[in-house]
Image (cartoon, grey):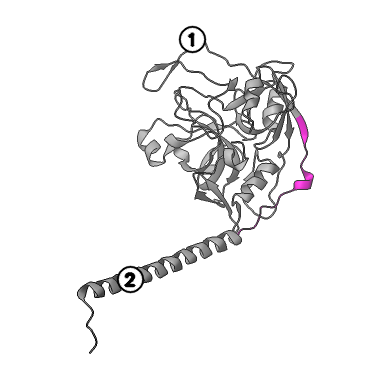
């Protein structure tokens, strides 16, 4: 006569069966998700552009000294007086990948700031406009003078008004050797870039090196003819400020206002970092910066927050589509520090 299984044994059999079914279901689900992701990635085509037509030329800049206004304070929209460090100089502790919001500064530029006062002097000089306009994000930089001579880095931002170009170096020791006034050469290439296998998307301030690095990071053209790119944040065009009204975006940036606490929290803007690739929704930059429903523009965070009305973290444009043919995917790692292997 067979022995009847005890209640304890039956419970163990049922539990074991449940665990096996759950495990098989989970494995099947993960396989499906992975296959879908691989298929999605495989369906992307690399962006093609007029590589052989692009002109590379040398532009030179000098490490800019920091400046200070008179009086030294600014007044924020609530009437509070602030005195903070600003643009220019060598910024040792806020570089690509560091917070552009959580710092006691105003329009701080990450890493090293270059300018070229040229013959006329000042940020509006012919040479400074050439430095800012021809330099593209991701261009190679080489130090020409001083203790750090020979060191190589990358362009990581462009600041309008001051006409500064920001550069960063993967070797931390370079910063210890740099001095204000040191001369650097930028191998400027990217102005004149045209995308060949996608319609309705314009590339601006984009170097071939950054384009290729973004492609390796997952950027590409979808089957529907859209540019898919990873960004850290989606930003509504309604909060964009200083920089509006320009007829082009080949120099400088425009600012994300952080004065509305509800919007800052909703879009997680306190987490913005130097070098973040971000999308501005309902913004067209084809011929200047305007509000346009359905448009999408993508750029990089180039300078820090500000306490001055209308100002905030600056965005230098990389792509724009009036027709909204840019598809963005949120990825917290979409930062130049990783994309260009700076840090």
On the image, the x and y values in percent for residue 47 come to 66, 52
* The C terminus: image quadrant: top right
Q: Nearer the viewer, residue 74 or 291?
A: 74
Q: Which residue is mark 2?
A: 16
Magenta extent: 44-58
Decide: few, some or many residues near mark 1? Use Cα within 10 Å; few <14, some 14-19, many ≥20: few
Q: Which label is found at residue 105?
A: none
Q: Nearer the viewer, residue 210 or 119?
A: 210
Q: Which residue is mark 1?
A: 71
The prevailing secondary structure element of the residues shown in magenta is loop
Residue at left 68%, top 17%? 181
Q: Among all residues in the image, which is located at the extreme bottom?
A: 1
**How many numbered callouts?**
2
Residue at left 68%, top 49%? 195
- Can you say whether 153 is above or below 127 in the image? below
- Can you say whether 129 is above or below 247 in the image? above
On the image, the x and y values in percent for residue 327 come to 54, 52
Q: Quadrant of residue 46?
A: bottom right
Q: Nearer the viewer, residue 170 or 193?
A: 170
Decide: few, some or many residues near mark 2? Use Cα within 10 Å; few <14, some 14-19, many ≥20: few
Residue at left 58%, top 16%? 66
Q: Is residue 244 visible?
A: no
Of badges 1 and 2, the one in the foreground is: 2
On the image, the x and y values in percent for residue 340 come to 63, 40
Q: Secondary structure at mark 2?
A: helix
Residue at left 56%, top 37%? 300
Q: Is residue 86 visible?
A: yes
Taking the magenta stretch, the answer to whether it contains residue 18 is: no
């Amino acid at each position: 006569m067979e022995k009847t299984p005890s209640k304890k044994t039956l419970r163990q059999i049922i539990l074991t069966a449940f665990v096996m079914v759950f495990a098989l279901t989970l494995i099947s689900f993960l396989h499906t998700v992975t296959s879908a992701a691989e298929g999605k990635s495989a369906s992307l085509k690399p962006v093609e552009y007029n590589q052989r037509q692009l002109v590379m030329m040398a532009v030179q800049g000098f490490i800019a000294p920091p400046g200070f206004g008179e009086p030294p304070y600014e007044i924020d929209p609530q009437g509070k007086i602030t005195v903070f460090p600003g643009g220019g100089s060598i910024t040792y502790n806020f570089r690509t990948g560091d917070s552009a919001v959580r710092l006691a500064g105003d329009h701080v530029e990450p890493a090293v700031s270059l300018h070229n006062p040229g013959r006329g002097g000042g940020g509006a000089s012919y040479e400074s406009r050439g430095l800012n306009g021809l330099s593209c994000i991701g261009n190679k930089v080489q130090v020409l003078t001083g203790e750090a001579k020979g060191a190589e880095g990358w362009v990581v931002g462009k600041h309008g008004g001051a006409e500064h170009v920001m550069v960063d170096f993967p070797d931390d020791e370079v910063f210890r050797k740099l001095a204000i006034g040191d001369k650097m050469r930028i191998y400027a290439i990217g102005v004149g870039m045209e995308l060949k296998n996608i319609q309705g998307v314009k590339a601006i301030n984009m170097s071939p090196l950054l384009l290729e690095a973004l492609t390796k990071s997952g950027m590409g053209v979808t089957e529907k003819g859209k540019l898919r790119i990873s960004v850290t944040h989606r930003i509504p065009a309604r909060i964009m400020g200083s920089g509006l009204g320009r007829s082009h975006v080949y120099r400088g940036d425009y600012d994300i206002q952080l004065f509305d606490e509800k919007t800052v929290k909703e879009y997680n803007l306190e987490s913005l970092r130097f070098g973040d690739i971000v999308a501005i929704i309902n913004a067209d930059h084809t011929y200047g910066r305007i509000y346009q429903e359905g448009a999408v523009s993508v750029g990089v965070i180039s300078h820090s927050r500000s306490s001055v009305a209308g100002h905030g973290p600056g965005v230098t444009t990389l792509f724009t589509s009036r027709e909204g043919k840019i598809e963005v995917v949120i990825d917290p790692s979409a930062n130049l520090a990783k994309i260009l292997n700076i840090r």
